[in-house]
Amino acid sequence: MAVFDTPQEAFGALRPACVQLTRAQTMENVARLQAHLAAVSASALQELQEYVLFPLRFALKVPGPKQERLVQSVVQCISSVLAATCVKKQDLLQELFSELCTCLSPPSSSSNPVPLSEELKLAVIQALHTLMHSAYGDVIWSLYQPSALPLLGFAVSLLLGLAEQEKAKQIKISALKCLQVLVLQCDCQEHRHLDEDEAQQCGDLFASFLPGISITLSRVITGDIKQGHKSTVSAIRLFYLIVGLVMADAQLARIAKNKEKLPVEESRISELMVHRGPDWSKSTAEKLSLLLRKMVEFSSVHPHWKVRLELMELVHHLLRNCSQSLVDSFSHLLKALVGLVNDENSEVQSRCKEVLQGIAEQRIVAQNRALADVLSENLHSLATALPRLMNSLDDTGKVSTLSLLLGYLKLLGPKINIVLNSISHLHRLSKALMQVLELDVTDVKIVEDRRCEGVCGPSGSLQHGAQKGRCQKKYFRFFTEEKIFQLLQQVCRVLGYYGNLYLLVDHFMGLYGESGMYRKQAAMVLNELIAGAAGVGVDVLQEREVSLNVDDLKGSIMSILDEYTDQANWYLITSIDTEEISHEHSVQHSGLTARPGGACSSVLLPSPEPHITTRTMNSNIWQICIQLEGVGCFAAVLGKEFRLLLLSALYPVLEKAGDKTLLISETALGTLVDICKACSYDSLQCLINENSDYLVNGISLNLRQLAHQPHASQVLDTMLRHSDASLLPLVEDVIQDVLSALDQSYNNQASTFLRVLHSVMTALVRWFESSCGEEHQQRQTPEWWSGTLSQGQQVVTRQEVEQFFLDYVRQKQIAEGNLPDTGDEEADEVLPLAEPEPNNSDTEGETPLPSHAQLAKDVMERCIHLLSDGNLRVRLKVLDVLELCVTALHPHGNHLLPMAHRVWPALVTRLISDDPLAVLRAFKVLCTLAQKCGDFLRQRFSKDVLPKLTSSLLSQAPASARAGPVYNHTLAFKLQLAVLQGLGSLCEKLDMGESDLNKVADACLIYLSAKQPMKLQEAAQSVFLHLMHVDPDSTWLLLNEVCCPHQYEPPHISLRPVKLSGMGRQRNEFTDNVLLLLEKLQQQESVMQQESVMPQAGTQEASPP
Amino acid sequence: MALPPPDPQFVLRGTSAAVHTLHFSCGGQEPDVPTLFSGSENGFIHVWNLKTHRVNTELDGHGRKSVYCVETIGSKNRLLSQGRDQRICLWDLAEGRTSVTDSVFTENVGFCRCSLLKVAQGRWLVAMAAKALEEVQVLELPSKTSVCTLKPEVGAKLGMPMCLKLWQLNCGSQPLLLAGYEDGSVVLWNLSMGKVLSQLVCHQEPVMSLDFDSEKAKGISGSSEKVLSIWSLNEQQNLQVYKTHKLVNAGISDITIRPDKKILATAGWDHRIRIFGWKKLKPLAVLNYHTATVHCVSFSDHKNPSERLLAAGSKDHRISIWSIYTQT
């Protein structure tokens, strides 16, 4: 299609159509004109604008009823003209505006107007829209003169009517858009920005429409959801734009007090104009507040996210422009805004955060006292309602309530102190936190879980414990979700970040001391406050005004630490273990302070409760844990500065690390790891070693107080557990203190000290294990060597049989007193045995005992006294310690043997006449002792103990043979088993004589019976296996006496046939076990035979000439 | 009812030898940490930081021979120490230095602690046992010029000087010296004339330690017997026995009157520290902590009375720090 670029050509093309349209206003003619218009260029059309518009306007103005469709096409045509051209004349603009508006209004004459078609309405609205856009800069301004107010008002009311009442979404939206253009707030970029004066003028003008617009829009916004989100969004936008314009703080500030007089001719108009004085703005704000509240309530829960997003924009816009004029509305607006922080839609969420950030950055709240008041008022009411809400809402509800609280605090930012300075606010807030954070203390397991002593290794248990301690979950009464706890944590941290730390710490310390009910929560809050104050893990919108003074922080931390570690708050009853309770009570009663810091404080002693429930104990455990966590948190906050506080803080934490309650000890370990990290120690061991002076000091001072002795021993225990041999020189001194303290109180504190001694000895054995082990092997080697040598001789060759008999004869002669002259052979035999002995004893006798062995010796000394303690538990513990002492002292035979000599009488008493439990334990000690001392004990053993053991084995045998499966769980069984299991190796170690071996064999033989419990049979077998090592021949004979599977043919006829009593016997209860043993003996012999060839060559090389 | 005796506030360990002498320096302002100097048998002087309770520096200047006297000269950066190597060393400790700036060879083989007195700005007198058995020599510091040598009259048979105390009534007046001798007598010397002003036999055994309160003109001395002797000085400069106090266990190795002259502390061979009221010698407390002879007691010079401390050094290698009667 040809395009007419010049006005002349265009005129030529358009003229016929225009003329025709003027003559007859028909659809066809309009359509033709429209078609021609399409072919005309914009510049050409601009020249012909009025010419073209004339017939169209004429068509509209023709009196009488018109066809709706005609009007519609005319209007469409007008708008296409306007879209391509600019309106440059004020008159034209106003006329067109009013003509178009008229199209919308039903003819006033008819009483019941026929509703216009929707298409027409849409066309007119669009035409108006286009008109507004085509109006030239200043030209459009003519519409916004006071004189044009009626016209404008007319258009506004028409459009509002459409927006409210129309059903069609399209019309609604278009009407709202058009209105937006009309109030000069169009979204598109083309418009000139209003300068201040113009804006002011518009504001004055639109103030007249404000009531109408706002009410209608609020109706639209709160209307049926079915209308679709778009119209709601548009309505919200229009609402905040117009309100933001009319109620802008900047404009209202410039309004003169009194209405200025307008010239007389405009007086009618001026009646329509509104004077935005203070009275007006106040009353308007009140009305708007009502509307806003309704809108916010409705749209903040609107299902469509775009509506919520737009709501946020509304808050943002109004907050930015009208924070003073609409201050009363902000309680609702901010609530909505803050509430949307956790919207399910991520876009809303992020925008909300942006908006909040923006508000904070612009310091809108910080600079506006009134707004801060609003916020604090909101906060107050929320805090008041919080406990109730937390009780009744579901988890999502709780989350949103708490995010609201958090949002208020964040928005308040540095203004938080306004809230905190008001007693009632602080009171409400803190009480709310106290109630919400209430822990659930009904879990019995926490009280039941005890630390298992000595099971897990030092390093392993640390890692494990630290991890467990860290992730120890708290159970709250009012909520279960972790997210809620995190929100509460944030609430406290934000408080700490902005708030006056002294005030807060003071207040919550007050609550801490006020009642046991609040103590745990208050401690939790205090911990978080400090973290927040240091800016750790706190998420805020704006920086605080004054950065934190480290000295202040340190001061607060020190006062909290003092309170936490105060006796009344640190030594709580956490178990019903009788011995512990008595200690704890004595602590509370004593009222004497002996703390590492030494600062004496008057203690408010809680009256000792007569009846302690699990609940109380659980609660106490949690309180200690929270306090421990606090210490860890303080360390993290202070970093290396915390090193100075270790003087007073480390001791109590270690004390708790040695606590028997699993949860406490694990939490304390976690705290220790935190401290390590904060103070940059490489490991827990470093921490302990480098601060051992503080700890040792604490231990030694506390040992002086009877009531604190258990704690001191716990600390020492923990130190030993988590450190290595390098600690020994540092604590040696204090271990001596422990020993001397023990010496002074054998009666009542023995069990406490035994625990320490036990851990000391365990540590010593662990640390010096390698040295013990080496020496052990050195000692063992020659024995084993000589053993194989002697056994090697047993290999039956003809010469050796001959030699054997010769030896036998000679021995017999010696035994009978006929001493032969000393030969070479004897010297040969003695030498290899004698050689290692002097070496050992000589060197040991001269060198002073290493400190650890000296300690072991000292401890062993105490054990001798305590072995006969009246309390069974003490005796059992002593036996354990004794065993460890023996192990530790083992490499130093010269010291061990005298000690063993001294221990012996007491030990024998335990073995012979004591509770079976003690006998069992004592027998174990005996086995260890035998292993370490060897034949030193032979005589005593065979004289003092063996008869008793064998007789008890014999007497018990019938009982166990008869017994059922339950017998396996009885003490008697365990005792039998232990004796049988230990007896074999005892015999071997002690190198027992023949008669004793026979006694043992006799006693054990009955246990080979198939009637005995399986375990006992196995144990008895083990005895015989050991006996085979010591004396294979006699064992063989003994077994064959019972049962002999083979016939032995003598190798020569001159020898008598072998006759063994076991031959040819019927199969009986012993047969199976005996055969098994004989088979093993056979194997052993054959292995020995094979080996005997090789090692003999080897021994010749190894043995010195 | 009387309160039970307190525990030490803290115990300092780590000298790894018997502690023979202690000296506080706590008068400084805030950034200055309170310090305690200790001299021990292995010849080391330890500088303790009383905030961290740890050794700041270790000074080794007496050839591993026992150090039995440590004093500060003016500030805590200048230190005087006396050891069994027969030397008195002067230390410069400013800015972390640990050097001996000067030393005096006393040639005395005993263990009599020297006594220091400030006589003017930058001028000190130090009295010490001299080479000859019965003599006391007084030097001026820092010039080390000899002021006088105090020789007892021939035939006095006082024996070796065991303890010395230089004092003056008030600033600018004549400095005097109180000396306790091996035969149990306390002698007041006039320094300028080098003459005995007064002599008083207080003990049957050697005088181990004495302290003197110039305000009340009263002094106290302890020996290896079971008696504390309090004596006074009248206007005619005559020493008179004022009172004696019986002890349960024999042997006092050190006596110190607190700077405020209200109480005094004794270091006993019976491992105990005893506290008495100075006015009437009323026994106030027996501090029981050490497990061996206590060698020395010292009161701190904190500006704030409530912070003041008592320290005691013992043969058991430990130094116990006590906070006692700070309220009175």
Image: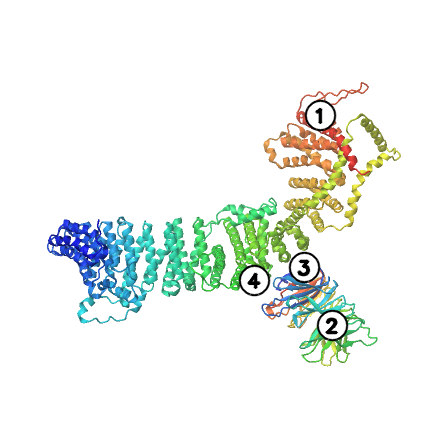
Q: Are marks 3 and 4 in contact (CB under 8 Å)?
A: no
From mark 4 to mark 2, how far is it between C-alphas?
41 Å
Q: Which residue is mark 3?
A: B14
Chain letter belonging to callout 1: A
Chain of the residue under the numbered disc 4 shown in the image: A
Both labels 1 and 4 in a single chain: yes
Label 1, secondary structure: give it. Answer: helix
Tell me whether circle 1 and circle 4 mark residues in contact (CB < 8 Å): no
The residue at which mark 1 appears reads as A1042
Residue A854 horizontal/vertical position (percent): 72, 50
Q: Which mark is residue B25?
A: none
Question: Is residue A112 visible from the viewing direction of this image?
Answer: no
The amino acid sitting under disc 4 is Ser
Residue A28, image x, y percentages = 14, 49
Is A517 situated above or below A968? below
Residue A700: image quadrant is bottom right
Q: Are marks 1 and 3 on the same chain?
A: no
- Type of amino acid under label 3: Gly
Looking at the image, residue A22 sits to the left or right of residue A999; the answer is left
Tell me how far mark 1 sits from mark 3, CA to CA: 70 Å
Q: Tell me the chain of label 3.
A: B
> Where does the image place residue B52, in percent across and percent down from the top left?
61, 62
SS label for mark 2:
strand
Chain letter for mark 2, please. B
Q: Which quarter of the picture shows residue B328?
A: bottom right
In three-dimensional space, the C-alpha distance between marks 1 and 4, rounded to whole angstroms, equals: 79 Å
Location of the C terminus of chain A by quadrant is: top right
Q: Report the amino acid beneath label 2.
A: Leu
The label nearer to you, 2 versus 3, is 3
- Asked whether A650 or A1018 is in front, the reply is A650
Question: Where is mark 4, residue-wise?
Answer: A601
